[in-house]
Image: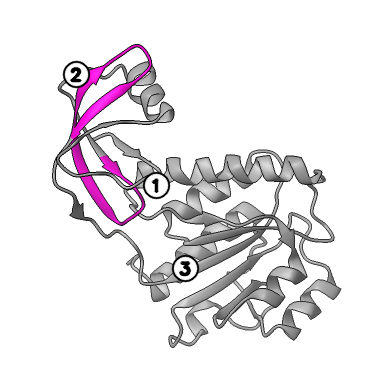
Amino acid sequence: MTRIFQPYTINQNSLITLDDNAFNHLIRVLRMKTGESITLFDGSNQITPAVIHEVNKKTVIVKTANSVLDNRESPLNIHLGQVISRGDKMEFTIQKSVELGVNTITPLLSERCGVKLDQERLEKKVQQWQKIVISACEQCGRNIIPSINPVMKLETWCANLTDSLKLNLHPKAEQGINQLPCDNNNISLLIGPEGGLSNEEISMTHQYQFTDILLGPRVLRTETAALTAITALQVRFGDLG
């Protein structure tokens, strides 16, 4: 069943006109016709079955049925702080972390961050990343949209975190995820850049009560590290088994 996100409250048992993105995907890409069924969701953790009622030159109108709760969320609340990686690695990390159940993503700038963009381009990147989040939710079945925060400096992010289990991947850490306590389902996970965090940055994270953790004997690329850590956390505390 084709799933479509709409950024407004979806009225039940009504005729509604979908937005331009939905029109483009359903009609121009998928070539769907009148009478075909789709599923709508609006971020409220509900889904609404619908049938394409009318297709015009630039709009598509659907008839909705009753909405139903469809909870696919993990009991684990993960906030990923990811230092921005180059090329399409950041997009890949965002897409897959959403599939794995991350709730919030904050793109970070650190000493060894290889991405140098001005404020305007960073804001455009955030908008692009939020679209990737929505597309990932449409694909994987999540009905609540994770948020992408504005880009911020690493220390600012660390200083602004509220009560959570704060984790930093470190190749020389003395404990792994299986040794972590199970008394907090709010986790802030820091993933450094391709060159790693500097010694000064690692010391700074300790000042903000971060715990260093080790994933294994091999050094992982930044995008591999993020997804491996999220998966391990979901197996240990969440809904992957």
Q: How far apart in space, not on screen, are marks 2 and 3 (Cα)? A: 44 Å
Indicate the secondary structure of the residue bearing disc 3.
Answer: helix
For marks 2 and 3 on the same chain, the one whose residue lies earlier in the sequence = 2
Q: Amino acid at mark 2?
A: Thr
Residue 45 horizontal side relative to residue 217, left or right: left
Label 2 vs label 3, nearer the camera? 2
Residue drawn at (79%, 57%) of the image:
195
Disc 3 designates what residue? 232
Disc 1 designates what residue? 137
Specify start and end residues of the magenta stretch as a single range: 40-63
Q: Quadrant of the N terminus?
A: top left
Disc 2 designates what residue? 34
Residue 4 horizontal side relative to residue 111, left or right: left
Q: Amino acid at mark 3?
A: Ala
Residue 69: image tag: none
Indicate the secondary structure of the residue bearing disc 2.
Answer: loop
Residue 214 horizontal side relative to residue 39, left or right: right
Any part of residue 216 in sight: no
Measured as percent of width and height from the top left, residue 87 is found at: 69, 39
> Foreground: 188 or 143?
143
Measured as percent of width and height from the top left, residue 164 is found at: 54, 80
